[in-house]
Image (cartoon, rainbow, N blue to C red):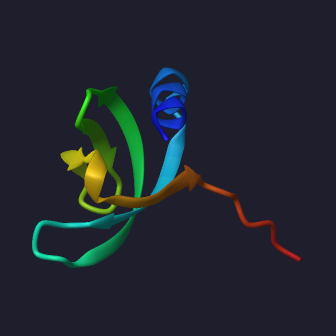
Amino acid sequence: MNGLLNRSAGKKQQLEMIYLDSKGVMSQRIIRVLNVSENDLLAYCYTRRKGRTFKKENILSVGPVWKKMGA
């Protein structure tokens, strides 16, 4: 996961993330990683439309955003 987050920050690539907040609520977000530290990551969250700090331990899943092709 750390490799993906660091590569994403360097390439300014959008990621899709499933996150569990401190209250136990799951959310699905589209983010762009700005900075990665040992325990946290700073990212622009397109869902909230602002910068957010996320705890790595609360990330359930993260991966590249796949663009859907129309028929």
Q: Position of residue 5 (x, y in %)?
A: 46, 35
Label total for image: 0
Q: Toward which corner of the image does residue 9 lie, by quadrant?
A: top left
Locate residue 36 relative to residue 68 in the image: left or right. Answer: left
Nearer-the-camera pick, 5 or 69? 5
Q: Toward which corner of the image does residue 17 lie, by quadrant?
A: bottom left
Nearer-the-camera pick, 5 or 14? 5
**Extreme residue toward the left, this view:** 23
At x 89% / y 77%, what residue is drawn?
A: 71
Q: Position of residue 60 (x, y in %)?
A: 40, 63
At x 45% / y 34%, what residue is drawn?
A: 2
Q: Is residue 1 above or below residue 12?
A: below
At x 24% / y 60%, what residue is drawn?
A: 48
Q: Position of residue 61 (x, y in %)?
A: 47, 60
At x 51% / y 44%, what residue is drawn?
A: 14
Q: Is residue 60 above or below residue 23?
A: above
Locate residue 60 relative to residue 71 in the image: left or right. Answer: left
**Extreme residue toward the top, this view:** 10
**Extreme residue toward the right, this view:** 71
Q: Is residue 56 above or below residue 9?
A: below
Q: Is residue 61 above or below residue 6?
A: below
Q: Position of residue 49 (x, y in %)?
A: 26, 54
Locate residue 42 relative to residue 7 in the image: left or right. Answer: left
